[in-house]
Image (cartoon, grey):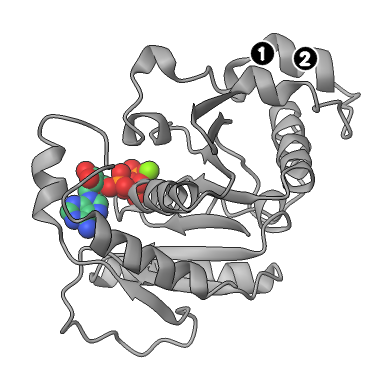
Amino acid sequence: MKLAVAGKGGVGKTTLTVWLGDYLARKGEDVWLVDADTALSLGPALGLGEDQVPTPLVRHKDLIQERVGSGGFINLNPRVDDLIDRLSLEVREGLHLLVMGTIAGAGSGCGCAPNALLKALLVHLVFQTSQHLLVDLEAGVEHLGRGTVSQVDGLVVVSEPSLRALNTASQIGSLASDLGLKQQALVLNRTDQDFVLPKDKSLPQVAAVFPPLDSLQKRQQSSSSVLDLEDRERIDALCEQVLNRFS
Ligand SMILES: Nc1ncnc2c1ncn2[C@@H]1O[C@H](COP(=O)(O)OP(=O)(O)OP(=O)(O)O)[C@@H](O)[C@H]1O
Ligand SMILES: [Mg+2]
């Protein structure tokens, strides 16, 4: 299963990506988590220290120049098979982290050099890893480009129960549909069970409702990790609901 996770800023995209990946890895699956956000927060959310997280691909200027070139001649089909090891980390058995940085170009075929390498790497990962791929995207709609969308099978749209977050979720749903990504699921995060979702045709169907968790809020006061909370069983059950939507 290859999924991208999108939504407005701060709604819980990174948290959910890590919960889904951790859940699958504990079930014995092989999982690749891809950080495609400039904020690069998957590492800390997995409990990694700054010095443990690989340098993101977008900061390897020499590598980008070497593989893709610059100026007028850009190689759109660069070699990437040897880069995975350099740019990724096996967090624990079956759980891998690849740090890329932002993939730009909403729907357009942006031909800039870093993007060409990012897209090539994502394509390679999709084809080489027969297993699960979860891409944590940058907040908002601008970065939901063809480069990402054409590589994944499904989109998890995360929202909070606020009008602004739901508007962004709706825009994302509609843009992804236009780009051909019809398999979508809405995850309501930090949401009480009695919340009534406004009617909006572009909002994907709700797959799961994650409640506000005191355990996570407390944890975040002293650690960036979102793992091994006392609510883990509850979180696992909700992750299963989300994943079932795509199987
Ligand atoms: N269900 C929840 N209950 C309590 N706190 C939560 C919940 N989900 C997320 N949080 C907290 O909300 C904050 C934002 O979450 P997170 O970083 O996952 O959002 P994001 O969408 O990835 O943000 P960004 O747009 O900045 O990348 C974090 O501190 C996280 O611990
Ligand atoms: Mg994030």
Quadrant placement of the C terminus: bottom right
Q: Where the N terminus falls, by quadrant?
A: bottom right
Which residue ends up furthest to the front in the rendered image? 28
- The answer to whether residue 69 is seen in the rendering is no
Q: Helix, strand, or loop for circle 1?
A: helix
Q: Quadrant of ligand 2?
A: top left
Q: Amino acid at mark 2?
A: Gln
Residue at which label 1 appears: 61
Left or right, residue 223 beside residue 35 = left
Q: Amino acid at mark 1?
A: Lys
Q: Which residue is mark 2?
A: 65
Relative to 91, 80 lies left or right: right
Residue 172: where, in percent of width, then height?
50, 66
What is the quadrant of residue 149 in the picture?
bottom right
Secondary structure type for disc 2: helix
Can residue 17 be seen at all in this image of the molecule? yes
Tell me the distance, in whole angstroms, between the alpha carbons under discs 1 and 2: 6 Å
Q: Are marks 1 and 2 in contact (CB under 8 Å)?
A: yes
Q: Percent from the top left, x then y, of residue 178?
A: 67, 72
| Side (left or right) of 24 relative to 60 | left
Vertically, is 62 above or below 30?
Answer: above
Give the number of marks.
Answer: 2
Q: Residue at x 66, y 69 (%)?
A: 181
Name the spot of residue 119 as percent of width and height, x first.
Answer: 73, 40
Give the answer, above or below, for where 79 lies relative to 3: above
Crowding at dot 2, Cα within 10 Å, few <14 / some 14-19 / many 20+, comes out as: some
Closer to us: 52 or 228: 228
The residue that appears at 39% across and 79% down in the rendered structure is: 206
Instruction: Name the residue at 87% across, 34% down.
Output: 76
Task: Report the front residue among 49 and 4.
Answer: 49
Q: Residue at x 60, y 49 (%)?
A: 133
Instruction: Give the image location of residue 18, x and y in percent.
Output: 40, 46
